[in-house]
Image: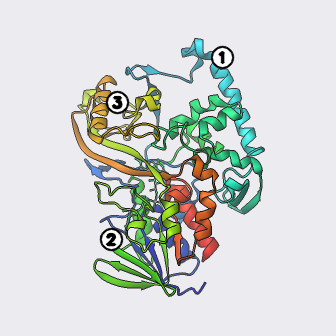
């Protein structure tokens, strides 16, 4: 492609900013990033409190975050944040240690079985499901893989593996099919509590895209990255190092694609581009209270775009930042496994203490309030449930200082995944001078989105 091509990038989150970085690295400097908010980072949002930054959005990474590492190198920064640590409570607020055999004598047979199944699962993923961990979902529904290896070199890999079709099954069913149902006891911790839905509804393809074997083992060993100034800082730094930083407060009113050109009406002015990369939400069924809409509502959407994107659902994931009295401050972060089942929708699943050395920092709480088969728990009801749960946990909140109901983890369900949703969207890449990136195209974490942008640039530019 001509290196002077004029590229518009919608969204200044990890996907949009890293698209800018990878384009620039390849010699494309004629790009413009349009961001609707007054800050970059998207779901990496790290506000200040008492002289430090806390996390309302993304918190952590793992050593296999190679795209995030690219960004760190590009900017000369590193993951220098507080070490993470956690413990577990039951729904009555009692501290438990579910994986400690000495504290769970009656559960020893189950724990031993689980350990065996984890080992077996690792082997199955390497062999029967070879290719399961490449970025994106290209070919999976047809029993193929096509992407880049999850290694520092990220060499291109592709092949045929009919077993990969199983990845469209909900993760619970996938585990049962392979006789390793107990691995869910471990996978659920960093999955459901992080807002990515329940194992009876979410295709295994997503669960394993994020929690590939290596990443899950890093979670088990608490071998995790954080950033002192928050994850937002990574993307602020990237923005500062780009030749064309994002244009903030850009309201896109209209996008028209005709005669090989893309006309974008932004803040009342029409701008002309050759190509457009969308990293913002593709589809949101109803306008959200925060004003976010999907691209189908401001683009001259074609029938195939509307048809496919209307299959996308997302999670209702709520975050509260609360103050506690110093004597009520938790000594560590806690996971509440009992609340990670759909029967306990709306309850507190995890609460996070970021700074160990001080009690004048906020605690953040996380709850999911939607399951595919269940009625949504209203926002205020969920908020009250979480505040009540904090009391039960013996860490009552004295004050809520920030709250966020996030447009979270866009995805499709098993039926559409199996029917080749991803291959149909991939076949549309570039068709209307438009490229689709961001969370839905691979998975909703910082690295998978940045990595997808890398591949998109690699494949099409
Ligand atoms: C509570 C929480 C915890 C998380 N924890 C982790 C974690 O520990 N580790 C991890 O890796 N990931 C985590 N994530 C997920 C991670 O933050 C996201 O997957 C990642 O930010 C996605 O990047 P993105 O650029 O695709 O989308 P986003 O981050 O959502 O960015 C999209 C950007 O597009 C902008 N935008 C939207 N519409 C428009 C429009 N019409 N015009 C212009 N701009 C628009 C938005 O304002 C936003 O800045 C977490 C997220 C949340 C909310």
Residue 417, given in percent of the width and then of the height, sits at: 60, 52
Classed neighbour count for the residue bearing mark 1: other residues with Cα under 10 Å, few (<14), some (14–19), many (≥20) = few
Q: Is residue 316 above or below residue 73?
A: above
Residue 172, given in percent of the width and then of the height, sits at: 60, 35
- The residue at the point 62 percent across, 48 percent down is 205
Q: Quadrant of residue 299?
A: bottom left
Provide the residue designation for mark 1: 109
**Can you see residue 274?**
yes
Residue 152, given in percent of the width and then of the height, sits at: 66, 58
**Can you see residue 221?**
no
Residue 248: mark in rendering: 2
Residue 330: mark in rendering: 3
Tell me the distance, in whole angstroms, between the alpha carbons under discs 2 and 3.
37 Å
Q: Is residue 125 left or right of residue 299?
A: right
Q: Secondary structure at mark 2?
A: loop
Residues at circles 2 and 1 in contact by the CB criterion of under 8 Å: no
């Amino acid at each position: 492609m001509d290196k002077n091509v004029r590229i518009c990038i919608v969204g200044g989150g990890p996907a949009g900013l890293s698209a800018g970085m990878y384009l620039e690295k390849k010699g494309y400097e004629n790009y413009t990033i349009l961001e609707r908010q007054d800050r970059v980072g998207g779901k990496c949002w790290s506000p200040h409190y008492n002289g430090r930054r806390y996390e309302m959005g993304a918190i952590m990474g793992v050593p296999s975050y190679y795209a995030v590492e690219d960004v760190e190198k590009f900017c000369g920064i590193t993951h220098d944040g507080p070490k993470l640590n956690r413990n577990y409570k039951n729904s009555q607020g009692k501290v438990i240690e579910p994986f400690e055999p000495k504290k769970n004598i009656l559960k020893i047979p189950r724990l031993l079985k689980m350990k065996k199944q984890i080992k077996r699962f690792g082997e199955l993923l390497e062999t029967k499901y070879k290719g399961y961990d490449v970025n994106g979902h290209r070919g999976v529904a047809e029993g193929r893989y096509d992407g880049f290896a999850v290694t520092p070199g990220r060499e291109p890999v592709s092949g045929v593996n009919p077993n990969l079709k199983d990845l469209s099954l909900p993760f619970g069913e996938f585990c049962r099919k392979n006789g390793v149902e107990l691995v869910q006891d471990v996978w659920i911790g960093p999955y459901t509590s992080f807002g990515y839905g329940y194992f009876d509804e979410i295709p295994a393809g997503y669960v394993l895209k994020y929690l590939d074997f290596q990443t899950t083992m890093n979670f088990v060993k608490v071998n995790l990255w954080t950033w002192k100034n928050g994850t937002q800082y990574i993307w602020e730094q990237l923005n500062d190092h780009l030749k064309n930083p994002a244009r903030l407060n850009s309201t896109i009113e209209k996008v028209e694609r005709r005669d090989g050109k893309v006309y974008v009406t932004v803040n009342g002015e029409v701008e002309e581009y050759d190509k457009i990369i969308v990293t913002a939400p593709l589809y949101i069924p109803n306008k959200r209270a925060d004003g976010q809409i999907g691209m189908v509502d401001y683009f001259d959407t074609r029938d195939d775009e509307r048809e496919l994107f209307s299959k996308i659902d997302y999670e209702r994931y709520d975050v509260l930042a609360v103050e506690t009295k110093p004597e009520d401050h938790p000594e560590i972060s806690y996971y509440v496994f009992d609340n990670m089942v759909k029967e306990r929708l709306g309850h507190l699943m995890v609460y996070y203490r970021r700074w160990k050395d001080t009690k004048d920092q906020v605690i953040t709480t996380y709850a999911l309030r939607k399951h595919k088969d269940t009625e949504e728990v209203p926002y205020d009801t969920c908020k009250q449930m979480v505040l009540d749960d904090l009391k039960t946990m013996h860490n009552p909140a004295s004050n809520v200082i920030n709250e966020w109901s996030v447009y979270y983890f866009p995805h499709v369900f098993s039926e559409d995944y199996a029917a080749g949703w991803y291959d149909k969207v991939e076949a549309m890449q570039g068709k209307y001078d438009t490229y689709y990136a961001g969370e839905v195209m691979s998975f909703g974490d910082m690295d998978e989105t940045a990595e997808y942008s890398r591949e998109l640039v690699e494949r099409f530019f």
